[in-house]
Amino acid sequence: MDFELWWLLPIPALFFGLGWIAARIDIKHLLRESRALPLSYFRGLNFLLNEQPDKAIESFIEVVKVDPQTIDLHFALGNLFRRQGEIDRAIRMHQNLLERPDLPADKRQTAVFELAQDFHRAGLLDRAEELFTRLDGSPFEHQAIGFLLQIYEQEKDWQKAIVATKRMEALAKRPYFKEIAHYHCELAQGAMLRSQSVEARNEIDQALAEYKLCARATMLLGDLEAQEGNQAAAIAAWQRIESQNPAYLGLVAERLADAYRKTGDVAQGIRVLRSYEDQYPSLDLLTSLFNQILAHEGADAGTQLIKDELQRNPTLLGLDKLL
């Protein structure tokens, strides 16, 4: 039997009709839902759109009183409380949600995350930490670790910060070696303050193992050597910063000058600083070099250094302070 094209003519009309019916059903459904919502809900939305959060909160509170089952609105209201600084009300809102036995599992995780943020904002760090750690394996784990890192940094709990950052590495699938090296440096510095040189050296080694260009770790290594009276080793450590990041040489310029003075080779110290200033000009390097020349070669030599530097690098900020 020959295929008749006219058979296809009703098909677009059929699909159009089905689409029209579906649209009508959706519209009716939306209308029913919108009629079910209290007027206060729409007033609250209007206040939000007009950037009037205080009035929006009051409107949403009316809705919650009328229909306590509006879970998402509870979350929205809790967030509004927190944003407005009404932390106690935000905490109560999210705690009430968690106390509901019928709260679905995914909403319970959301409530835990929101309540943890409330505690964090309120400065109740122990309680915030406990809740954030409960979110392991949840959709909020990544964000929770970010908050935990803030807590650990605030509390200077560097060991926990290292563990959390390594978890972040696994989740984000990207390296955080600079951050981990920084935390090891913090631990090294603490150990040095306690005169625990073995522990300090171990943390420095771990920092450099994580990030071999960590200038701070090398700076601390030089400090540790100097603290133990090993001036030559300290000088060697500080000079390695040139190959890591020469921008940090200015931070060890005074240390280098002092170490060379203690080894009885002030002239070599001046030569080293002058070489650094020629290659990597900075105000910190110049200040240290100027002080050394002024102390050991006299005012005329110091003045000449500044004049030469002005000609070579007239844009160096703060140079006029040395004149």
Image: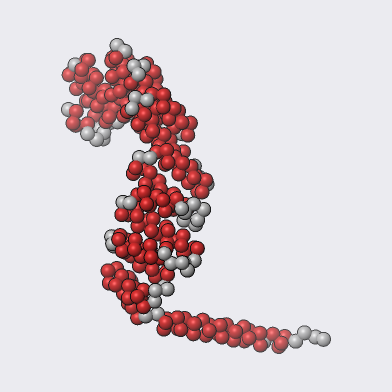
Q: Quadrant of the C terminus?
A: top left
Q: Quadrant of the N terminus?
A: bottom right
Figure check: 83 above or below 300: below
Q: What's the coloring here?
A: secondary structure
Residue at horizontal 48 percent and vertical 46 percent from the top: 168
**Is residue 238 visible in this depiction of the protein?**
no
Q: How many numbered circles does the render carry?
A: 0
Residue at horizontal 42 percent and vertical 57 percent from the top: 113
- Is 28 left or right of 64, judged from the image as shown? right
Q: Observer-nearest residue: 221 or 92? A: 92
Question: What is the residue that sits farthest to the right in this orientation?
Answer: 1
Q: Position of residue 246 (x, y in %)?
A: 37, 30
Residue at horizontal 72 percent and vertical 85 percent from the top: 5
Figure check: 40 above or below 195: below
Q: Position of residue 46 (x, y in %)?
A: 33, 75
Residue at horizontal 42 percent and vertical 82 percent from the top: 36
Figure check: 198 above or below 2: above
**Is residue 184 visible in this depiction of the protein?**
yes
Q: Observer-nearest residue: 96 or 90? A: 96
Q: Position of residue 317 (x, y in %)?
A: 24, 35
Quarter of the image holding residue 93? Answer: bottom left
Q: Observer-nearest residue: 102 or 8? A: 102
